[in-house]
């Protein structure tokens, strides 16, 4: 098939959506499909089957861009449209699918209303924008043949297929190289933005000065974090992707207090490298982190967070086995099936798609 990925987030920006697009594209092309990526232009040289759309700098969120319009007639002939965002390029993909009567799939990656609270000065205005935005996105998602999301719950009033992003289990595995052989290190990797709540990691570091904390990433909150970081915290920029397995394998516990993840890919990557995760007891971690791969803590409760870290450090777990079901091979096999199943009704697709990642209460207890 000739598949079109329409995404509002792509390189050079580094985030979970960007790496998901890259990984899914590589896997689908390995399976024999052609994947075209339509994305906002920027400081990035497009490769084969990568189609930039002229865009402007985003004054509200540094690093991301606001795409403009591209004529659908300039796009290649496609067999299926797969949108990865609700902004201009997602709308372009939906229009293209409707114009050519093509199957359309949407993957929900990010609860964008969380970012209003980060970038709008007045909380009352941010809350009003959120109330306005969510119904609009609901209506947009309803126009697709199938909507997918990484977990059972996406905070949207639409039927959806549970389709985890997937981990490259061959790439993310324990390494022999250890960057911190003589230190107890608590680590984090991800964007340094409000919804990731990295300041909570600094609180844990201040409470446990005998441990070292290494925070890997970049984002709008970096300067604030650097000003307030205790002496036992090291802040590094984003690592080259090939070094991530070494980092995950070298730390003793991965710590996150994020409240806005849809799957928490970095937590599962750390698990695949043999490292337990301490995560806030909020979605999606109440579904993905349990006794087999880590501990959960009450968000905002310092004592609970520190206890979760200590328990992770003191307990042996087969974390890699616990996340095997999130392997990208399983995800791609099922995504390929969804491409072929359209035009099944969304309700029928959801019934057939639940079972591979069905959650049991025992896992999350």
Image (spheres, rainbow, N blue to C red):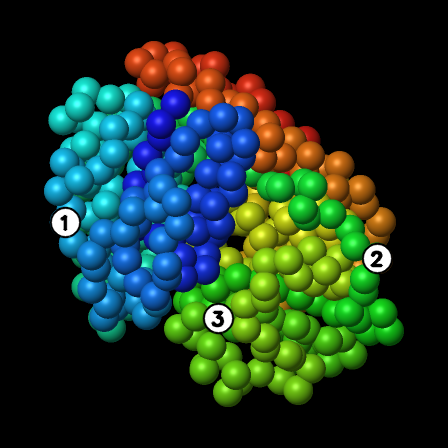
Q: Name the residue beneath numbered marker 2.
A: 176
Where 226 sits versus 46, above or below?
Answer: below
Give the image location of residue 150, x and y in percent.
48, 37
Looking at the image, which residue is at 24% across and 22% down? 102
Q: Name the residue beneath numbered marker 1.
A: 69
Taking the image as drawn, is residue 142 in sight? no
The secondary structure type at the circle numbered 3 is loop
Check disc 1: other Cα within 10 Å, few if <14, some if 14-19, many if 20+. Answer: few
Left or right of 140, for residue 275: right
Give the image location of residue 212, x and y in percent.
73, 76
- Quadrant in the picture for residue 215: bottom right
Q: Which mark is on residue 218?
A: 3
Looking at the image, which residue is at 66% across and 61% down? 243
Looking at the image, which residue is at 25% across and 42% down? 90
Distance between the alpha carbons at the discs numbered 1 and 3: 29 Å
Taking the image as drawn, is residue 188 in sight? yes
Judged from this view, the residue extending furthest toward the front is 48
Q: Which of marks 1 and 3 is nearer the N terminus?
A: 1
Q: How many labels does the image show?
A: 3
**Nearest the eye: 39 or 268:** 39
Picture quarter with the N terminus: top left
Give the image location of residue 154, x and y in percent.
40, 38
Where 183 sits versus 24, above or below?
Answer: below
Left or right of 239, for residue 158: left
């Amino acid at each position: 098939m000739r598949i079109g990925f329409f995404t509002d987030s792509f390189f050079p920006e580094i985030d979970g959506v960007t790496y998901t697009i890259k990984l899914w594209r590589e896997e689908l092309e390995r399976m024999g499909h052609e994947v075209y990526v339509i994305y906002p232009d920027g400081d990035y040289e497009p490769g084969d089957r990568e189609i930039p759309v002229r865009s402007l700098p985003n004054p509200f969120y540094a690093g991301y861009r606001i795409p403009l319009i591209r004529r659908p007639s300039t796009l290649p002939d496609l067999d299926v449209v797969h949108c990865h965002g609700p902004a201009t390029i997602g709308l372009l993909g939906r229009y293209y699918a409707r114009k050519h009567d093509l199957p359309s799939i949407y993957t929900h990656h990010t609860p964008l209303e969380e970012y209003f609270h980060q970038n709008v000065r007045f909380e009352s205005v941010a809350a009003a924008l959120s109330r306005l935005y969510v119904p609009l996105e609901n209506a947009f998602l309803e126009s697709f043949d199938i909507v997918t999301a990484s977990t059972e719950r996406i905070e949207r009033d639409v039927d959806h297929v549970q389709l985890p992003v997937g981990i490259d289990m061959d790439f993310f595995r324990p390494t022999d190289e250890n960057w911190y052989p003589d230190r107890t290190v608590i680590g984090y990797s991800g964007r340094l933005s409000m919804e990731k709540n990295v300041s909570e990691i600094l609180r844990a570091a201040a409470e446990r000065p005998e441990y070292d904390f290494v925070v890997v990433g970049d984002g709008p909150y970096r300067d604030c974090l650097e000003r307030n970081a205790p002496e036992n915290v090291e802040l590094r920029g984003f690592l080259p992707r090939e070094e991530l397995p070494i980092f995950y394998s070298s730390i003793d516990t991965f710590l996150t207090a994020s409240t806005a993840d849809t799957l928490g890919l970095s937590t599962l990557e750390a698990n695949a490298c043999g490292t337990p995760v301490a995560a806030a007891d909020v979605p999606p971690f109440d579904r993905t982190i349990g006794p087999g791969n880590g501990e959960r803590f009450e968000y905002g409760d310092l004592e609970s967070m520190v206890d979760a870290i200590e328990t992770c450090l003191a307990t042996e777990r087969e974390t890699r086995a616990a996340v095997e079901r999130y392997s990208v091979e399983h995800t791609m096999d099922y995504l390929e099936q969804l491409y072929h199943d359209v035009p099944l009704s969304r309700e029928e697709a959801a019934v057939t798609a639940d079972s591979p990642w069905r959650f049991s209460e025992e896992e999350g207890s």
